[in-house]
């Protein structure tokens, strides 16, 4: 009998959060480690715990940044870019791609931002750090989480991963995916290099959030035959750290 046709395109995409989905480094901004003149600069007080950052993001969204669309919209580069990200995520979902986030940031903060921007429903899972993984500030110690924000807090199962490369291996094995069927999207060249033998990668080299070339590349990957994706990967090996968007 004739062999069944292989499914088209990539089936799993895992996104980094800070400076990949977002334009600014959200964890650094909220912890007071933001760089003046680059990205979103947040006024004191600062927070490094999951509970504290959730409280602080909510305060900023309802206060300091309310007239600018809230903290999340500013962190994602403004309303126009938010729309681009929303459209890209929807297009990927329409192409039957499973989407996830894996970040060294705090799960609660990421969940809050994604929901504020109507993106949370696109992601099957968010992997990150939880609770007091990065310690505590004076603000963290005094913060009281409002009842309506508790649903954003992460759980231990979201914080059990050791490395993004190993997480990709596990996710792909669970789904029976080949290298050309999974993508890690990242702004960190070390993470890109580590994941390269495991899956395809899209490198956000400017560390300022995905832009149109990255959105276009992901949609192409999701809709092209496996053979075409694999062939392109074979010929792109020399361009891993090329400026702009590099697939490998």
Image: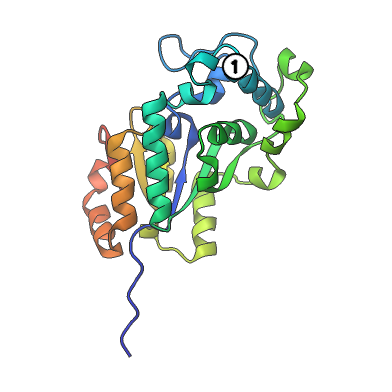
Mark 1: give few (<14), some (14-19) or many (20+) Cα within 10 Å.
Answer: some
The residue lying furthest to the left in this view is 235
The mark tally for this picture is 1
Horizontal and vertical percent position of residue 215: 33, 41
Q: Nearer the viewer, residue 189 or 32?
A: 32
Horizontal and vertical percent position of residue 114: 54, 35
Q: Mark 1 highlights which residue?
A: 60
Query: Does residue 178 sit above or below 27 in this rendering?
Result: below
Query: Does residue 191 sit above or below 36 in this rendering?
Result: below
Horizontal and vertical percent position of residue 199: 40, 53
Q: Quadrant of residue 208?
A: top left
Q: Is residue 198 visible?
A: no
- Determine whether, in the image, residue 142 is placed left or right of residue 135: right
Query: Does residue 131 sit above or below 157 in this rendering?
Result: above
Q: Nearer the viewer, residue 66 or 246?
A: 66
The residue lying furthest to the front in this view is 67
Q: Is residue 97 visible?
A: yes
């Amino acid at each position: 009998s004739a062999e069944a046709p292989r499914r088209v395109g990539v089936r799993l995409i895992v996104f980094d959060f800070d400076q990949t989905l977002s334009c600014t480094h959200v964890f650094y901004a909220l912890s007071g480690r933001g760089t003046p003149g680059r990205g979103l600069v947040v006024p004191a007080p600062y927070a490094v715990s999951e509970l504290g950052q959730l409280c602080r993001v909510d305060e900023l969204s309802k206060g300091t940044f309310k007239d600018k669309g809230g903290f999340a919209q500013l962190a994602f580069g403004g309303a126009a870019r938010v729309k681009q990200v929303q459209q890209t995520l929807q297009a990927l979902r329409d192409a039957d791609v499973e989407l996830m986030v894996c970040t060294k940031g705090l799960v609660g903060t990421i969940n809050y931002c994604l929901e504020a921007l109507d993106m949370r429903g696109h992601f099957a899972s968010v992997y990150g750090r939880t609770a007091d993984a990065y310690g505590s500030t004076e603000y963290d110690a005094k913060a009281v989480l409002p009842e309506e924000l508790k649903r954003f807090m992460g759980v231990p199962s979201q914080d059990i991963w050791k490395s993004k490369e190993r997480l990709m291996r596990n996710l792909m094995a669970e789904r029976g995916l080949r290298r050309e069927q999974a993508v890690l999207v990242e702004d960190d060249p070390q993470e890109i290099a580590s994941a390269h033998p495991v899956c395809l990668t899209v490198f956000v080299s400017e560390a300022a959030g995905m832009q149109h070339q990255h959105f276009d590349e992901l949609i192409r990957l999701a809709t092209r035959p496996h053979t075409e994706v694999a062939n392109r990967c074979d010929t792109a090996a020399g361009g891993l750290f090329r400026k702009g968007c590099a697939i490998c």
